[in-house]
Amino acid sequence: MSPTPAQDPAGLNLSWVVRVRWFVWAAQGLLLLWATFGLDLRLHAAPLSGLVALGFGSNAAIAVWQRQRGRATENVLLGVMLLDVLLHTAVFFLSGGPFNPFTALYLVNVALGTLVLSRARQWAQLLASMAGFGSLFVLERLAPASLELPNHAQLMRLHLAGMLVAFAVSAAFIVTFMDRMVVSLRRREAELAAARAQMARSEKLAALTTLAAGAAHELATPLSTIALVSKELGRALDSQSAPRAWRDDAALVREQVQRCRDILQRMSASSGELAAEGFSRVTVGEWVSLSLADVRDAARVRRPAHEDLAVLGPKVALAQALSSLLRNGLQAAKTSVTLGARAEAGRLLLEVKDDGPGLPPDVLARLGEPFFTTRPPGQGMGLGVFLARTLAQQLGGSLDYESTPSGTTARLALPLAEEQRT
């Protein structure tokens, strides 16, 4: 698996440098053709053609190397830029020296280095570019007369005619590719932010799992004792023909103790289910049946039409997630809750729609926050939507809500089973 841009920023930067080099060397080649045939300058065609070919060939080699290796480093980026400084200096020396208007291309590498290199390497690349440009003034004087470089009259024609072109090309390179580079870097930052958010959600889930496991362990013994004592108390009250209200109170204690047990068990199972339970193929029909078994007023739920659609996931965790959504819908519904299921773009869209009054925007924005609930105290923990959304995201899906004055729809999207994807 190849690394993502967030995992390999140097590789992303190298990809952009390779793209810039294609255009830069194409511009160099076109400039030399124009100078030779358009301005009738006598240039050393063979070595210049070889240098341009070396620029294209090195770029192709870098692209192949990156595809095969998959990762890059800043040292590789710096090496590529220093190679360009060397090749450009040789081309400029043979085609006008400091009079060559395309010496402005040094600025392209300087600008790119500012974006993709660390501070020390930026300065190294800048100093190399300055040295390359400055060497043109020295090399021109040291060149032997037999080399037959273009004379100053010819170079002035090249310089004046090419200044506008060189400026336009350099400016276009800098603006276009720096803009694209910045967009790519911003996209990478967004990916990192999403990864951090996902990590934060996972940490919350882990904290809930630890909390639930600890609570279940610590409260199991006292709850069992209370259940046993309340049961014996109820028997004693029955044998003594105690007032009905006393016996009802004892029964209420047993009922509330069992409710506490169920809550702890549901917290522990829901928060840790995905990590412990194996994956299996679950059809919508089976999923809905398992979910309805844990829901009161199940008769008010209208089952979906396409129950043959299937997903791959932890069966119990999926059932608990849908049960939470159904309970929320039934609480808000005036008459019934409608379940819809359909396939769309390789995903199963399972919708839980109620006919209630809808949710205000401030409540809708907070749905899914741990321990946020609209139910009265004692009737909900505020974990159902959070755990359902966490499960959906870990399975590669999502959970979204849409609310209008005529009702609220919870839309659960999960990847379809492999054989049902089109």
Image (cartoon, helix red, strand yellow):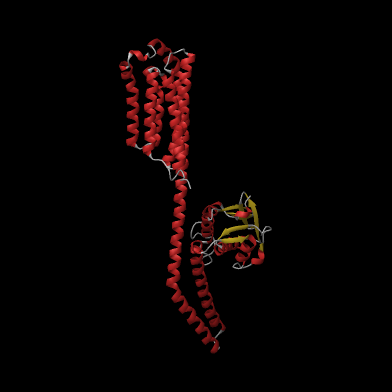
Return the residue found at the far top: 153
Residue that appears at 43% across and 31% down = 58
Q: Nearer the viewer, residue 61 or 20?
A: 61
In this view, 382 is above or below 79: below
| Residue at x 54% of width, y 82% of height | 247
* Residue that lies at the very extreme toward the right in this rendered image: 305
Residue 308 horizontal/vertical position (percent): 66, 59
Quarter holding residue 342: bottom right
Check the image and report above or below for 318 versus 148: below
User: Residue 202, percent across and down?
Assistant: 46, 56
Q: Is residue 385 above or below residue 76?
A: below
Q: Is residue 240 visible?
A: no
In the rendered view, would you say 390 is above or below 125? below
Q: Which quadrant holds residue 76? A: top left
Residue drawn at the location 51% of the way across and 57% of the way down: 390
For this rendering, which residue is in front, 158 or 338? 158
Q: How many marks?
A: 0
Name the foreground residue: 314 vs 320. 314
Can residue 67 be seen here? The reply is: yes
Residue 305: x percent and y percent?
69, 58
Image-based side of 196 in relation to 248, left or right: left
Residue 397: x and y in percent read 55, 53
Which residue is nearer to you in this view: 339 or 254?
339
Q: Is residue 178 left or right of residue 126?
A: right
Given the current orientation, which residue lies at the most extreme bottom position?
Answer: 240
